[in-house]
């Protein structure tokens, strides 16, 4: 029994380590924005708390709360890095967030309507706002 528990814990740690993003990956800033959007839409507060930078917290929490009473899904989301300079990246996304109000009224929010900003903090890329 003890060996089974240790084996499961070891496997879990290996899986978690394998899922960690590599900050040197050129797509890491885009992955950070995607992770932020996915956690926000899925209402996964635990993952969401680690997906944004401290300077963006107030806006991030407001955005997360705004999806609390609606059904939403990401449709065909793809994010790409436009530029990186001094630990800050500009990221563009395509696709949409489809939001359903009262189970029947659907509104589609175009992800391409804005540029996303990701910053590197403690070696990790995080969603940190919107660009122009």
Image: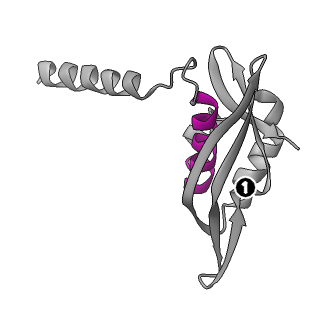
Q: Quadrant of residue 54?
A: top right
Is residue 30 shown left or right of residue 17? right
Above-or-below relation of 9 to 129: above
Task: Return the residue found at the far front.
Answer: 82
Q: Nearer the viewer, residue 2 or 84?
A: 84
Query: What span is in magenta?
Result: 28-45
Is residue 84 shown left or right of residue 73? right
Above-or-below relation of 76 to 108: above
- Which residue is label 1 attached to? 112
Which residue sits at x=58%, y=47%?
A: 39
Q: Nearer the viewer, residue 44 or 28?
A: 28
Which quadrant, please, contains the C terminus? Answer: top right
Q: Nearer the viewer, residue 30 or 101?
A: 30
Colour scheme employed for the rendering of this structure: one colour
Is residue 119 shown left or right of residue 7? right
Above-or-below relation of 129 to 76: above
Is residue 19 shown left or right of residue 125? left
Which residue sits at x=65%, y=70%?
A: 99
Q: Position of residue 71 (x, y in %)?
A: 59, 69
Q: Position of residue 128 (x, y in %)?
A: 76, 34
Q: Position of residue 90 (x, y in %)?
A: 75, 35
Circle 1: element type: helix
Mark 1, other Cα within 10 Å: few <14 / some 14–19 / many ≥20? some
């Amino acid at each position: 029994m003890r060996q089974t528990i240790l084996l499961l814990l070891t496997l879990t740690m290996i899986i978690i380590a394998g899922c960690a993003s590599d900050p040197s990956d050129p797509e890491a800033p885009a992955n950070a924005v995607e992770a932020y959007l996915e956690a926000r839409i899925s209402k996964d507060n635990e993952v969401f708390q680690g997906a944004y930078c401290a300077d963006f917290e107030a806006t991030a929490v407001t955005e997360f709360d705004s999806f609390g009473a609606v059904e939403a899904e990401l449709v065909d989301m793809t994010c790409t890095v436009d530029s990186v300079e001094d630990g800050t990246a500009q990221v563009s996304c395509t696709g949409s967030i489809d939001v359903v109000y009262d189970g029947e009224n659907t509104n589609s929010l175009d992800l391409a309507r804005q540029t996303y900003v990701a910053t590197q903090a403690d070696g990790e890329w995080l969603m940190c706002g919107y660009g122009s």
